[in-house]
Image: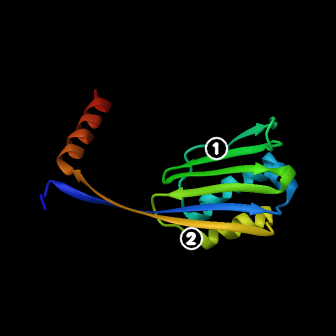
Amino acid sequence: MNSSNETIRLDGTHLMLDCFGCNKKALASEEAITGFLNELPDKLGMKKLIKPYIVTYPGGDSWDRGGLTAIMLIAESHISLHTFPHDGFFTADVYSCKPFDVEGALNIFRRYFRAKTEKIQIAKRDIEFLRNRNMAVLLNKHKVKQKGQ
């Protein structure tokens, strides 16, 4: 291999969770969702990039009677949550470019939302690519030079 290249390996985990029979008050509570989205990354060793971002949807003409959509951007990727309080249902994604404690994440979901039924899917992303070290060094030198001007 060319010494000017370095291998980058991403061993990501994507947890997809659909839960039914949940605590309807928790699903409708911005305070509960905010607490959940602040706690989960901390417990999993992820770095939060923003405060939890929550949008309330009042519902529409379809089956959807409204709920909350929330996202937490993390350095490793994102955590998203869509709640349907009238139906006691939520769907969520926890995606990280690094492995994380899936069982630990599930336990936090369980504590906050107390689902009676869970559909759990886990996908692994196994990605490897080459990065040109010389280009990275040049870019870093350029950034340093700009800051010093």
SS state under label 2: loop
- Identify whether 57 is placed above or below 4: above
Q: Residue furthest left?
A: 2
Residue drawn at 81 percent across, 35 percent down: 61
Colour scheme of the rendered structure: rainbow
Left or right: 128 in relation to 25: left
Amino acid on which the number 1 mark rests in the picture: Lys
- For marks 1 and 2, the one nearer the N-term is 1
> Which residue carries the number 1 mark?
51
> Which residue carries the number 2 mark?
101
Q: Nearer the viewer, mark 1 or mark 2?
A: 2
Residue 39 picture location, percent across and down: 67, 58
Residue drawn at 62 percent across, 73 percent down: 103
- Quadrant of the drawing holding the N terminus: bottom left
Left or right: 134 in relation to 115: left
Left or right: 123 in relation to 109: left
**Quadrant in the picture for residue 17:** bottom right
Residue drawn at 56 percent across, 70 percent down: 101
**Local crowd size for mark 2, using a 10 Å CA cut-off: few (<14), some (14–19), many (≥20):** few
Residue drawn at 84 percent across, 54 percent down: 87
SS state under label 1: loop
Residue 115 picture location, percent across and down: 79, 66
In this orientation, which residue lies closer to the viewer: 59 or 100?
A: 59
Residue 70 picture location, percent across and down: 68, 45
- Identify whether 144 is placed above or below 19: above
- Disc 1 to disc 2, C-alpha distance: 22 Å
Amino acid on which the number 2 mark rests in the picture: Asp
Q: How many numbered tags mark residues here? A: 2
